[in-house]
Amino acid sequence: MTAECCGYPISIFFIVVNEFCERFSYYGMRAVLVLYFRYFLLWDDDLATSIYHAFVALCYLTPILGAIIADSWLGKFKTIIYLSIVYAIGQVTMAISTIHDITDANRDGTPDNFTFHIALSMLGLILIALGTGGIKPCVAAFGGDQFQEHQSRQLNTFFSVFYLCINAGSLLSTLITPVLRAQECGIHTQQQCYPLAFGVPAVLMVISLVVFIAGSGMYVKTDPEGNIMWSVCKCIGFAIKNRFRHRSSSYPKREHWMDWANEKYDKLLIAQIKMVLKVLFLYIPLPMFWTLFDQKGSRWTLQATTMSGDFVSILISTVNPILILTLVPIMDRLIFPLIQKCGLNFSPLKRMTVGMLFAAMAFVSAALVQIEIDKTLPNFPSSSESQLKVVNTYSTTLNVTISPNEHLLIESFGVQLHTSKHTYSTISCMFVNDFSLIHGEQWCEFSRKFGFGASYTFLIPSTVFSDDCESITEVEDMKPNSVHMALQIPQYFLITTGEVMFSVTGLQFSYSQAPKNMKSVLQAGWLCTNAVGNIIVLIVAELGKLPKQWAEYLLFASLLVAVSIIFSIMAYFYTYIDPAEIEAQVRKEQGLEPEEMEKETLEMEEKDEDQKNEQGVKQTKI
Ligand SMILES: C[C@H](N)C(=O)N[C@@H](CCCCN)C(=O)O
């Protein structure tokens, strides 16, 4: 009997707090990852985007590994603990890799040995991917294991609270870590504080582990049930081999190719695999949704860096979790029941299709924003053009002729240079609010806000210190970023509406259509669609480089529309099943009535229990 509070097992409080801290750690680190690649490691946009998506893909491939370790070897409890330790080490490694002072021997503020920082951060990211992905299919299922049969209502609420905790953790961390990055810190020189931005998620991961361990005396821990994934693979392998062996037309056909495993494998297992394969087949087009969805963290973040709005950038990245926290209850309690009342059958697969279309619309919105940004960007000379800059410091307008026949009027800046020797210097700086020119005892001070993305030229006459500072002329070569970040809100709203329709429904669908013992298999399959989606971004970003960013956004939107049409056709032919009913039917065909089955299972469990007691094995059971 487990300890309860308000009808809930007390142990789940440790699990939801653990999930909150873990998601804080994960999303906090992700929020500054592309910026770290771009501005600390000085990678270009494409490389930063590629490595970011490779990392996300790895995070969604490792759940298979986690599920195998938990099911066949350690059990969920130990898997979560061991992989959380790996995860925390990864976060600490990542935080250390961002300390520029470690290799900044000449103390100029930039690391001297980039290879060291790259190697350490890649090691950190691999450990994080192993940890976060490995525990992903285990934590929710372990939470579910805490509930007993009479607590099915509480079990449903648990999954909602669990999803809310994910988004609360994500919301807080995406608010906090960019602020931490914007601080200045360092031993020799003060730089943007990446160690703090990555260090706080590392601390949260340690707290997550401590909280999980703190509840260990209260958990219901189930032993590994044997590696179901391995049994599934062996059964499928046998069916294929057997089908190949009997490929001659003289052998009678079987209803389903999995029926070729009948000779060796249990009918129930075969029926269960058929159910899973049907759903997995439906998953084939789904990665395209994640291809678009996960570009929030890369392309959209980089898009925001070319826009104006100081604090909006932080708010923009929190739009997604805030909308999730509000849209999930609104959709569940209001929109979906209303659609049902109107007599429309808004089935899960239809919802997912609509979710895809919302994501496509989000990318059309991103393309429109990009077109606006491009209008404000300076025109650089193409390969067949050159750019001349003529600075007229003479007192009147001059007529300049460029051979053979182009005439330009060059306005005077009203400054005369009294020397024929000019020296030009270019200084690139961040966060400039003021600067001074100092010569001996005299100085000229400028205090004003310089816009992000802008470029200025200051013309300083030789008489400046004997005359007055007013004679200095300022020229704005490139205008500051002027498209406001608030324009990104529609694309965030559309993609999050898509997420609620697609992701939340997809999770429920995967759970409801899976046989009881293969729910983790389908969860891992569902997470895999995410991994494949990120691999597609990598391929498109690397191979299909389009000259204009807006064109790439439109390409992704069109691809998703095409995929959603294919998915809707596949969904049309899909018949929803009740796995429990099918399993009962197979058992009946095998001559085992449900009651008999139950009795048989009980007898086997008792026998098993006796054997273990005899061997002095101490075990915890539901
Ligand atoms: C924060 C985000 N809105 C969210 O809810 N994420 C979930 C589901 C992720 C699905 C695959 N990208 C999470 O578990 O992090």
Image (cartoon, helix red, strand yellow):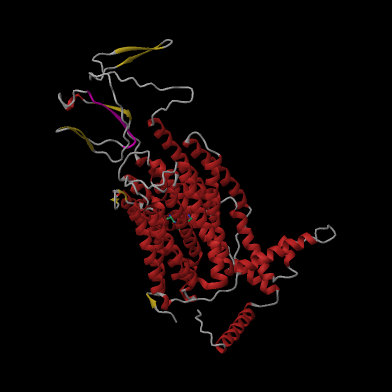
**In the displayed structure, does residue 287 sit left or right of residue 231?**
left
Q: Which residue is at the front of the view, 173 or 575?
A: 173
Tell me if residue 113 can be seen.
Answer: yes
Q: Is residue 280 above or below residue 68?
A: above
x and y, in percent, of residue 414 in the image: 23, 19
Give the magenta range: 452-461
Q: Compared with residue 91, is residue 421 higher up or lower down, i.e. above or below?
A: above
Q: Quadrant of residue 244?
A: bottom right
Q: Residue at x 73, y 68 (%)?
A: 262
Give the residue furthest to the bottom. Answer: 614
Please tell me in which quadrant of the rendered image residue 255 appears: bottom right
457 in magenta: yes
Nearer to me, 438 or 91: 438
Q: Residue at x 35, y 49 (%)?
A: 104
Q: Can you say which quadrant of the picture contains the N terminus?
A: bottom left
Q: Quadrant of ligand 1?
A: bottom left
* Residue 343 in sight in this render: no
Residue 536: percent from the left, percent from the top? 55, 47
Compared with 425, 592 (above or below) is below
Query: Would residue 243 be counted in the magenta stretch?
Result: no
Residue nearest the observer in this picture, 26 or 82: 82
> Residue 557: where, in percent of width, then height?
51, 41
* Identity of the residue drawn at 41% across and 27% down: 379
Give the residue furthest to the front. Answer: 106
| Residue 230 picture location, percent across and down | 63, 67
Query: Does residue 622 appear left or right of residue 207 in this picture?
Result: right
The quadrant in which residue 615 appears is bottom right
Q: Nearer the viewer, residue 11 or 573?
A: 11
